[in-house]
Amino acid sequence: MAKDDVTQIRIGNSPVGIIGLKSVMEDMADEYGDRPDPEVQEELLNRLSKRNYVPSRVREDYGKAFLREFKKVLGKPIEEETPEGIQIKVLGPGCVQCDRLEQELMQVMSETGITADIEHVRDIKEIGRYGVMGTPALLINGQVKSVGRVPLKSKMMEWLREAQGARR
């Protein structure tokens, strides 16, 4: 299995790796693009459940997340879920600087005791959707905080404390 076969999506407040998501959506795009949401959602669940474990108690949550991702692929408007807590995205293809930013961010979180959901976005197309013109880039709760460099730990600490205060 190639690394690209797994796509990370958000289901509820958790990032979950889904096997074969991109290929299933490409296969369904033409035939299901104009069908009603419940029908598309059910077909996505049926196809993706063959290679992924979908717990029965959260099947509906998975279906909604799959449908949201399908709409993104088709370029249709979607309602993003607003996750609770601090949401951090490190944007970068996995270069030394990008990985360093992620590591230093985790050190700062450990030192301060601040918890957050960290996602490292490595896919170039996905990074492009954020409109940043360089990597590594750091987003906290959807706001671009840094582009093209690894910020000082003291600055990251300040941003995390601000984000923590805003979420209370």
Image (cartoon, rainbow, N blue to C red):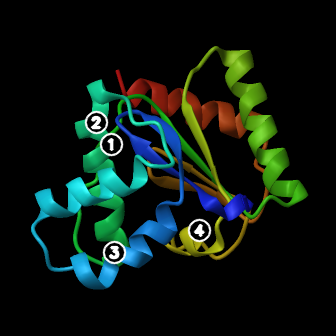
Q: Amino acid at mark 1?
A: Tyr
Q: Amino acid at mark 2?
A: Arg
Nearer the camera: disc 3 or disc 1: 3
Kindly identify the residue that appears in the image at 60 percent across and 38 percent down: 118
Q: Name the mark on residue 59.
A: 2
Q: Earlier in the sequence, mark 1 or mark 4?
A: 1
Rounded to the nearest angstrom, the CA distance separating label 2 from label 3 is 20 Å
Q: Name the mark on residue 127.
A: 4
Q: Residues within 10 Å of mark 4 (few under 14, many from 20)?
A: many
Residue 48 on image: x %, y %: 41, 53
SS of the residue at dot 1?
helix
Q: Name the mark on residue 75.
A: none
Judging by the rendered image, the residue that carries numbered circle 3 is: 28
Q: Badges 2 and 1: C-beta atoms under 8 Å apart?
A: yes
Kindly identify the residue that appears in the image at 32 percent across and 49 percent down: 65
Looking at the image, which is closer to me, 163 or 10?
Answer: 10
Nearer the camera: disc 1 or disc 4: 1
SS of the residue at dot 3?
helix
Q: Amino acid at mark 4?
A: Ile
Q: Farthest residue in the front direction? A: 50
Quadrant in which residue 158 is drawn: top right
Quadrant housing the N terminus:
bottom right
Q: Residues within 10 Å of mark 2 (few under 14, many from 20)?
A: some
Looking at the image, which is closer to me, 147 or 47?
Answer: 47
Residue 69 on image: x %, y %: 36, 61
